[in-house]
Amino acid sequence: MATPSEKLADSLQELQKLQEKALVAIRSQDLSRTHRERLQKAGFIQSVIKGWYIPARPDETAGESTAWYAAFWPFCAAYLNSRFGDSWSLSPEQSLAIHAGNWTVPKQLLVRALTPTNNVTALPYGTSLLDIRASLPTASDTVTLDGQRLFSLPSALIACAPDYFRRNATDARAALSLIRDASEVLEPLLEGGHSTIAGRLAGAFRNIGKDPIADAIIDTMRAASYTVKETDPFDEPSPMAFSNRERSPYVSRIQLTWKTMRQAVLDEFPPAPGIANDKQAYLEQVDDIYVTDAYNSLSIEGYRVSANLIEKVRSGDWNPEDDQEDRQHRDALAARGYWLAFQSVKSSIEKILGGANPGEVVERDHGAWYRELFAPSVTAGILKPADLAGYRNGPVYIRRSMHTPLNRDALRDAMPAFLELLSAETEPAVRVVLGHFIFVYIHPYMDGNGRMGRFLMNAMLASGGYPWTVIPLQRRDDYMAALESASVDGDIGPFARFLAELVREALP
C-alpha cells in the first residue's frame, strides 16, 4: 500500500505535467478529484474561484498574496478564453496601460465581451474582474500580448475615455510616445469621422512635444472637411518632450516617472549638507554602523542573523563548516556576502567622496556589489557561477506586491535609461529616493534587489553628505507600503517622507 508521501508524489507528477504545458490556470477537469484535494491540502495549489486553481508554494504563509499576483495575468487570459473564446478584449484604458508597459495588477480588470453579461467576478485579495457587454475592436485592431487580447495602440487611443489622459498621465504619455507618424492614427480617425477625438489627440501629441504629429492630424482632418478644435486633455504640460528615436515604453515610463516625482522628493527631503570635508571620518562612521545595517537589511529580507554572526563574519572568525544546517548555512552565507558587498560599496563611496559622478560610479560598480553579495553562495555550490553573470533572464515577482517588475528585455532597455538619469541628476535627495525606488521598481536581479537598492541609496546619501542610514526591521511594513504606493499608485510622497524621517534622525 502506498504511503502518504508516495501518494503526494504521484499527485505532484500530475501537477508537473500541467506545468510542463505552461498551464497557470488549472481547471477542475485538469486533475482528478483525488489529486486536486491532495495537492490543495498540501499547499501546492490554491483555489481562485469555483472550479479554478493556480499553483502555489506550500511554504507560503497563510494570507500570502504572491502566488496570486504572479498568476493574475495568465489566469485571467485563460479564464476569459474559456468563457468567451475570441469574443473578448481588455478595455481601451487597460490596453493603453499595457501598451505603455504598465503590468501592475489592477483592483478591477475591465473586460469587453459580446455575449450578454455585466458580471463582476470576485478574485483573491480584493481583486475582481468586470466583464461588460460592449463593442470589440475589429480583427485588424486587435493585438494579443502575453495572452491578453487588447485594442491596438491607435484604436485604444481613439476609444479611451477622455479623462484617461488626466487620471493616468504617465501611461497616456508613454503610450503616445510610441506613435511615430500621424498616419498611424489618422486612418481610423478619418474612417470614423472622429473630429472631437482628433482634436483631443492633437492636443495630447502637442503636450508631449510631438508638434508635427499634432499639426498633421489637424491639417488632414480639416482637409477632409471636418471641423476640428484642438484641446489638451492633460492637466499640466509634459515634464519632458519626446522624440521619435525612443521605441521602448519602459524607457519612456522611467524617464517620465523620474521627472514627475522629482519635485515631490525635494519638497520632503532635508537639504543636503554637502560632501564631507573629512572623508576618512565619514568612512569610519560607515564602518561603525556596519553591524546594525547588516542585521536590519538582512532581517528585512527574511534572513535570521544575529549580531554575533555578523561580527564573526566581519572579523574573519566564521567558518562555513560550522553552519551546515540548511537554514543556518543559508543565513551565514548571506551574512558573508553582505560583508563583501558592503566593502565594495564603501570603495564606491570613497570614489564619490573624491568627486566622481555618483551615477557613473554606480553604473560602473553595481555589478561588482552584486557579485560580492552572492559570491559565497557560488563558492558553496548553492548558486552556479553563471548566476553572477548579470541581470536576470527570467521573470521575478515581489512578495505581496501588485507591481509586476519589468520583463527581461524591458529591463535591459530601462537600466541604461535609469543610470543616465542618476548620472544627470544634480540634487542628491532625488538620487537617494528615486535611485532606490526605480532600481527596485525595475528589479534587475533574480535576488538581492532590496539589499542592492539600499546600498545604492546609501551611496547616494554619501554624495550629498548625508549619513549612512539604516532602514530598521521594525519599520519594514511602513517601508514596503511606501514602496508599494510609489510602484502601484505612482505616489512617491510616502516613500520620500519615510526616508526623509530616517535621514533626519541619523543627522548629527
Image: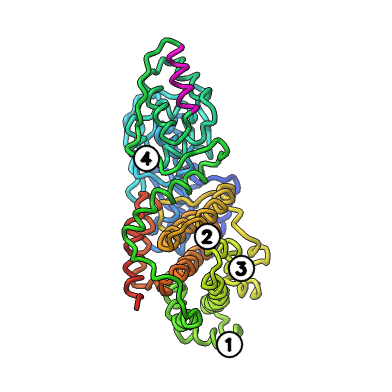
Disc 4 element: loop
At label 4, which amino acid type do we have? Asn
Residue occupied by mark 2 = 8
Residue occupied by mark 1 = 316
Residue 330 visible in the snapshot = no
Does 115 appear in magenta? no
Residue occupied by mark 4 = 168
Snapshot colouring: rainbow
Instruction: Measure the alpha-carbon separation of dots 2 and 1.
Output: 44 Å
Instruction: Measure the alpha-carbon separation of dots 2 and 3.
Output: 43 Å
| Left/right of residue 316 with respect to residue 55 in the rendered view | right
Query: Counting residues from the N terminus, which is met first, the one under dot 1 or under dot 4?
Result: 4
At label 3, which amino acid type do we have? Ala
x 54%, y 27%: residue: 181
Disc marking residue 368? 3
Query: Counting residues from the N terminus, which is met first, the one under dot 3 or under dot 4?
Result: 4
Q: Which residues are magenta?
A: 212-223
- Where residue 501 sits, quadrant-wise, is bottom left
x 53%, y 37%: residue: 243
Q: Position of residue 498 (x, y in %)?
A: 33, 64
Q: Using a 10 Å C-alpha cutoff, classify the residue at mark 3 as few (fewer than 14 neighbours), some (14 to 19) or many (20 or more).
A: some
Q: Quadrant of the N terminus?
A: bottom right
Query: Counting residues from the N terminus, which is met first, the one under dot 2 or under dot 3?
Result: 2
At label 2, which amino acid type do we have? Leu
Disc marking residue 383? none
Query: Counting residues from the N terminus, which is met first, the one under dot 4 or under dot 2?
Result: 2
| Left/right of residue 501 with respect to residue 76 in the rendered view | left
Q: Closer to the camera: disc 3 or disc 1? A: 3
